[in-house]
Amino acid sequence: MTDQSQGRISDAQVAELLALTRDVDSVELKMTVPDSDRRAAVVALGMDALDAQIRQVYFFDTPDLRLDKHGVVVRARRAQRRGADSVVKLRPVAPAHIQEAWASDNLGVEVDAMPGGFVCSASMKATWEPTLVKEVASGAKAIHKAYSKEQRSFFTAHAPEGVELDDLSILGPITVLKLKLHPPELRMRLVAELWLYPDGSRILELSAKCPPAETFQAAAELRGFLTVKGLDLSGEQQTKTKSALEYFSAQLSGSD
């Protein structure tokens, strides 16, 4: 994991990123748009909220975020006009090591790259019927019901000792508006996600996936496109997941 406080990565980080891309399944280029630029970004990219897919995202952790501190993220989500899914994610990871230890079609190893930093993660995924996550979130079903046997094994192998899935607190939901964009000037599909937090705060993230071998070319193209659109790439990058975890953790602490 690298520092995201600066807009560009160092030569040493470039070498590290290049090495990582040889062993991962995909690369996702990301940036969060500063609050001051959000409206301009919506106009410049032609975003229409009525075209967006509505999602609800839930995280599961202890009130003091022991999983997060241990590099483990447990998430489930439900989406409008689609089914539900769940993931157990580890970050940072050494891709070759995790792939050797967990050979599975349900395991995805990806680099998330953003202005000033990057991190490699491994995600064990599963898909479910649309109602399952809703039932888990309401307490009608236990948390482990939203995770496959393979995911539960993955969790047990990497979670802090003594932490069980069904002992976790439900952190959520976060409402998310997801919009797929196809700018003619860009070879890649651009995805915009607006995360709406219960306190009224928002995070707008733009992202694009590319094959690992095309990481640097794709990053240059995306950077050029966003710069031409007038978007500031030098601002501090916010993390959607961490912001959500910290918000709901504070809510749990306040209710004690």
Image: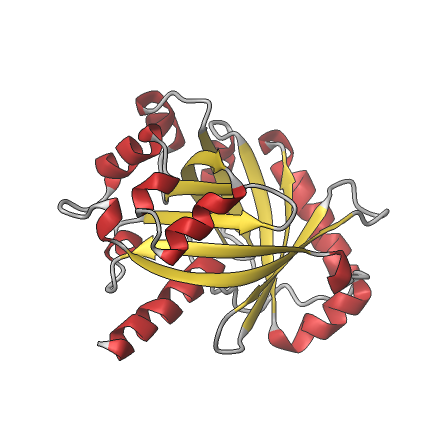
Residue at (61% x, 43% y) in the render: 82
Q: Residue furthest left?
A: 162
Report which quarter residue 172 is drawn in.
bottom left
In the image, taking residue 4 as reference, residue 44 lies left or right, namely right
Residue at (33% x, 27% y) in the render: 97
51 over 196 or under it: above or below: above
Q: Which of these two is toward me, 37 or 196?
A: 196
Image coordinates of residue 187 in percent, x first then y, are 78, 40
Q: Which of these two is toward me, 126 or 237?
A: 126
* Camera sees residue 98: yes
Q: Residue furthest right?
A: 184
Q: How is the image coloured?
A: secondary structure
In the image, taking residue 82 as reference, residue 240 lies left or right, namely left
Q: How many badges with numbers are in the image?
A: 0
Quadrant including the C terminus: bottom left
Residue at (52% x, 64% y) in the render: 237
Report which quarter residue 100 is drawn in.
top left
Report which quarter residue 37 is drawn in.
bottom right
* Camera sees residue 12: no
177 over 252 or under it: above or below: above
Q: Which of these two is toward me, 19 or 68?
A: 68
Image coordinates of residue 78 in percent, x first then y, are 53, 49
In the image, taking residue 248 as reference, residue 22 lies left or right, namely right
256 over 21 or under it: above or below: below
Image coordinates of residue 167 in percent, x first then y, are 22, 52
Image coordinates of residue 40 in percent, x first then y, are 75, 72
Residue at (34% x, 47% y) in the render: 141
